[in-house]
Image (cartoon, rainbow, N blue to C red):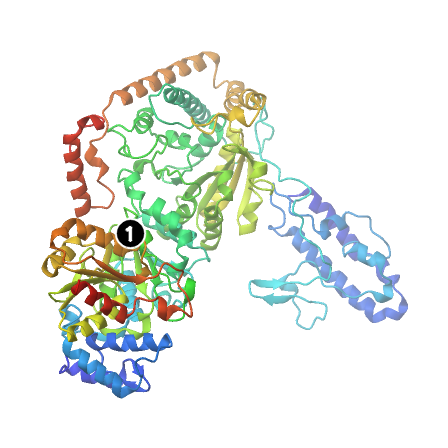
């Protein structure tokens, strides 16, 4: 069985069934009662066993809420009172006053219309059994949902169960990707500090999520990004020059200089243009996934990224719910990095992170160590496979830490300790962890490290210099693409602006004036 | 049209029944009947709803109207159907002509709360016509994503009053989708349909006219039809337009407005206003259900010798300034009327634009006959609405300025 604990409990149940100790000890006056109890005993244990064995009960890495069944089953069998019903109730009532209660778990196969003991009912939405035990589902499970990881902090693989083997080629490419992302971030951040670009956001600390997830996808998977996933675009072939062009908003920017830096988009890389509002991409991603579903090729999915803060937005709820109802092939990847600007996750939600929100919508979910690139790769690969083969949504919560500031407009030392930042930057760096692993495999070494570092640095610096020198798009691009064709009003406004520029040239930067 | 064969044929079977009587149908008369129904729905009894007075008023109004619609309808081509049927036909055609078009929203599966989507799911399948969860931001967001992948996404918002949760998606996403991507992406295939406007008993949340909010958003189009024949053609144009469109349907007219509508696939141009009645003394501009009111007002003004030119704007964004300007150059006077509250209503934009263009030609200030600056009330609806007499008063005041 998938769960060793399940095996134990099943054995306990079977032995209970076999023993007739319970029935023998009932008062002889209650023969009918005894018979009913026997039937109930048989049925309920059958149900419970079926429930335990059902695939929905226990996901690999998710503990379900502790219901009475599991905890009670682990109690010692009491000769008088059966363990698997509500033990406490039986202890507190006399045998004569025992009322027959329905099972905890309904099963369609067990439905017997003549059976007085079956107190279930078909409300809209499905069959539900009743209980006279008032118990609230706890706000928390006993244990937090555990986090899937493959590499420990020393870069050692801790399990030989790997969903998808990673070749040397792939691993070194992944590492190279993470390095590139880090260097690009460092230099473009600096460029902003120097006043050369207006704004920047780094992905420091989240390189494993960026590259690990990107590597697990195929190029025809459609990406809806939040804003801290440029590594996905990088992996797909968006060049450093293209990144820099967008940040400088020059005439080579495919976005035509309309948005702030880091609002990348690339049609040819199947990466929808980033927008600043949080979570708006989620229901859109579901719509796109519906289109993919209608294509019926089952060769691609949609991947929608988000942060922890994003899960508080209404659009998150909308996206998750629609994805589940429409049954679309989509993987939601949440980078839970602990912070939404200055808001820690404890001010963001009170659930056990984001992974537990999935089941609320009927979505299969998993939690992964976001700083373990290998684990992220595995999980996203598996999630993608499920999403495509079963045409349904998956939620992946990748736990990580936002090492950098929220953006160049933020100084995170104002709301968190530098020690904390340093800890995650040094001891928990996803890049070093992965490097240790590939070094252990003899796929990487110091020499290569410094060589690649220096090459990437050169490339990034050059890209920035080229982008900076390139002129901005013609100012006529202010008026295009509002609609597919410019309107009369826009043409008038354009002419009016042309006149104004002629009259007051000093008011305007010297873009190419092709108005 | 009165001598038209079709006219007499349909009189007996289909039409607006008031007090058991059948009214002659067609574009000319339906406005009268509409007004009567709306009026009686609002609790007024200024017009007795007996058959004789209805027919007499309709026959007298017949004389003073020229055709309200395009030649196709005037010639009697097509079948007399109501607004929701016309919209339903447009949707059938849209889905039939494009296999990658989808209709979705709350309750559209069974036919919709206003029956605009009847028969679609049965004919095209549940994968193309389906209910969504109750979540407007999800509906529009989903539609944007679907459209961004090259499909035609026809989203229904159950009442325009509930469109606001989707406002972020419409304004920040749909409207900017093409522009912000440098034209790499677009969601032009998106059409958002919503019933709007007074219905006699709707109160705050079933009567709103939110068009002004959307007219302020570059990147989307806003279209409002006045009648069944217009609605079908305009809706097909909206669906096929390569830009995201918000299409407001005057709910008060869903059942009562009946008109000959061609059965085939036809499109009416967007951003083109239509002069539905020519005149020389004053230009009236409106859209949707309000045109019926304005038409009555024109008729009454005619009796006092005021010749009114009535324009249906049809597309509010981007709107046809040229047609309105040309008309005001002819008449020298402008009156705009809409149900939405006057302050910041779309009439203000029209007024400002026309003043810019026609200042020296204007003989009088531009009049706006609109709803008051209050939430849309229930029992006070008759007081709130810009009724015929308010419009007539304003026409006279403008002409006598």
Quarter of the N terminus of chain A within the rendering = top right
Q: Is residue A450 above or below residue A364?
A: above
Tell whether A46 sits left or right of A222.
Answer: right
Secondary element under disc 1, as helix, strand or loop, is helix
Disc 1 crowd rating (10 Å Cα; few below 14, some 14-19, many 20+) is: many
Quarter of the C terminus of chain A within the rendering = top left
The quadrant in which residue A458 appears is top left
Residue at (79% x, 48% y) in the render: A75
Q: Which residue does the numbered mark 1 point to in the structure image?
A: B215
Furthest-top residue in view?
Answer: A447
Residue A470 position, x and y percent, is 24, 23
Q: Is residue A77 above or below residue A495?
A: below
Tell whether B300 sits left or right of A57.
Answer: left
Q: Is residue B189 visible?
A: no
Furthest-front residue in view?
Answer: B401
Q: Is residue A164 above or below residue B117?
A: above
Q: Is residue A383 visible?
A: yes
Tell whether A415 sits left or right of B262.
Answer: right
Residue A471 position, x and y percent, is 22, 25
Chain ID at mark 1: B
User: Residue A55 versus residue B176: which sits nearer the camera?
Assistant: B176
Tell whether A338 sits left or right of B233.
Answer: right
User: Residue B270 versus residue A457: which sits nearer the camera?
Assistant: B270
Residue A334 position, x and y percent, is 50, 38
């Amino acid at each position: 069985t998938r769960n060793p604990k399940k095996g134990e409990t099943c054995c306990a149940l079977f032995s209970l069934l076999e023993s007739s100790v319970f029935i023998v000890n009932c008062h002889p006056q209650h023969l009918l009662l005894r018979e009913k109890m026997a039937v109930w005993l048989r049925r309920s244990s059958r149900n419970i066993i079926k429930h335990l064995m059902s695939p929905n009960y226990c996901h690999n890495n998710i503990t379900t809420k502790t219901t009475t069944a599991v905890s009670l089953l682990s109690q010692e069998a009491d000769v008088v009172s059966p363990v698997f019903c509500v033990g406490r109730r039986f202890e507190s009532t006399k045998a004569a006053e025992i009322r027959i209660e329905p099972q905890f778990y309904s099963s369609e196969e067990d439905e017997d219309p003549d059976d007085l003991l079956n107190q279930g009912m078909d409300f809209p939405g499905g069959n539900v059994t009743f209980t006279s035990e008032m118990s609230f589902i706890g706000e928390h499970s006993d244990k937090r949902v555990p986090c899937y990881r493959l590499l420990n902090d020393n870069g050692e693989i801790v399990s030989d169960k790997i969903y998808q083997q990673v070749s040397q080629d792939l691993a070194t490419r992944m590492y190279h990707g993470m390095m590139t992302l880090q260097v690009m971030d460092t230099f473009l951040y600096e460029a902003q500090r120097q006043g050369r670009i207006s704004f920047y956001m780094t992905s420091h600390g989240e390189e494993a999520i960026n590259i690990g997830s990107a590597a697990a996808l195929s190029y025809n998977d459609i990406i809806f990004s939040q804003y801290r996933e440029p590594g996905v675009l990088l992996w797909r072939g968006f060049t450093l020059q293209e990144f820099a062009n967008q940040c400088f908003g020059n005439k080579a920017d495919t976005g035509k200089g309309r948005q702030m830096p880091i609002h990348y988009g690339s049609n040819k890389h199947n990466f929808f243009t980033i927008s600043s509002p949080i979570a708006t991409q989620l229901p859109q991603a579901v719509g796109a996934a519906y289109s993919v579903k209608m294509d019926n090729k089952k060769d691609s999915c949609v991947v929608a990224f988000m942060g922890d803060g994003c899960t508080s937005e209404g659009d998150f709820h909308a996206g998750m719910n629609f994805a589940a109802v429409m049954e679309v092939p989509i993987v939601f990847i949440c980078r839970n990095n602990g912070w939404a600007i200055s808001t820690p996750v404890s001010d963001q939600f009170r659930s056990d992170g984001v992974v537990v929100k999935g089941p609320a919508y009927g979505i299969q979910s998993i939690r992964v160590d976001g700083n373990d690139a290998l684990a992220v790769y595995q999980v996203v690969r598996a999630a993608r496979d499920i999403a495509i083969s079963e045409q349904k949504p998956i939620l992946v919560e990748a736990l990580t830490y936002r090492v950098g500031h929220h953006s160049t407009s933020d100084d995170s030392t104002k709301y968190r300790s530098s020690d904390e930042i340093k800890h995650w930057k040094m001891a928990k760096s996803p890049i070093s962890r992965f490097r240790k692993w590939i070094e252990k495999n003899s796929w990487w070494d110091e020499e290569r490290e410094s060589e690649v570092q220096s090459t990437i640095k050169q490339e990034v610096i050059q890209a920035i210099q080229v982008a900076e020198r390139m002129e901005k798009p013609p100012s006529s691009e202010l008026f295009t693409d509002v609609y597919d064709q410019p309107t009369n009003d826009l043409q008038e406004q354009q002419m009016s602006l042309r006149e104004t520029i002629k009259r007051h040239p000093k008011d305007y930067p010297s873009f190419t004036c092709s108005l | 049209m009165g001598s038209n064969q079709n006219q007499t044929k349909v009189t007996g079977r289909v039409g607006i029944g008031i007090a058991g009587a059948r009214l002659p149908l067609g574009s000319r008369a339906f406005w009268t009947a509409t007004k009567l129904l709306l009026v009686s729905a609002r609790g007024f009894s200024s017009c007795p709803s007996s058959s004789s007075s209805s027919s007499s008023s309709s026959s007298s109004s017949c004389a003073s109207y020229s055709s309200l619609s395009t030649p196709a309808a005037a010639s009697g081509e097509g079948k007399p159907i109501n607004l929701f049927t016309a919209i339903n036909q447009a949707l059938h055609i849209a889905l039939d002509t494009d296999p990658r078009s989808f209709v979705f929203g709350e309750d559209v599966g069974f036919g919709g709360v206003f029956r605009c989507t009847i028969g679609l799911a049965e004919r095209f399948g549940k994968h193309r016509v389906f209910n969504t969860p109750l979540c407007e931001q999800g509906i529009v967001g989903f539609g944007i994503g679907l459209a961004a992948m090259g499909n035609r996404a026809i989203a229904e918002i159950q009442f325009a009053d509930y469109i606001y949760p989707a406002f972020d998606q419409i304004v920040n996403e749909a409207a900017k989708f093409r522009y912000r991507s440098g034209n790499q992406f677009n969601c032009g295939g998106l059409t958002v349909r919503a019933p709007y406007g007074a219905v006699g008993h709707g109160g705050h949340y079933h009567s709103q006219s939110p068009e002004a909010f959307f007219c302020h958003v570059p990147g989307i189009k806003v279209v409002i039809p006045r009648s069944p024949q217009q609605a079908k053609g305009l809706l097909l144009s909206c669906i096929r337009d390569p830009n995201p469109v918000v299409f407001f349907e005057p709910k008060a007219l869903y059942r009562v407005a009946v008109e000959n509508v061609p059965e085939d696939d036809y499109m009416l141009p967007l951003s083109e206003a239509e002069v539905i009645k020519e005149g020389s003394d004053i230009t009236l501009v409106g859209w949707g259900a309000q045109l019926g009111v304005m038409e009555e007002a024109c008729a009454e003004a005619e009796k006092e010798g005021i010749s009114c030119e009535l324009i249906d704007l049809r597309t509010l964004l981007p709107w046809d300034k040229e047609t309105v300007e040309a008309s005001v150059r002819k008449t020298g006077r402008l009156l705009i009327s809409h149900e939405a509250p006057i302050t910041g209503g779309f009439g203000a934009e029209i007024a400002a634009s026309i003043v810019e263009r026609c200042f020296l030609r204007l003989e009088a200030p531009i009049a706006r006959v609109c709803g008051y600056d209050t939430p849309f009330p229930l029992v006070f609806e008759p007081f709130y609405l810009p009724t015929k007499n308010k419009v007539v008063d304003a026409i006279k005041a403008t002409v006598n300025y």
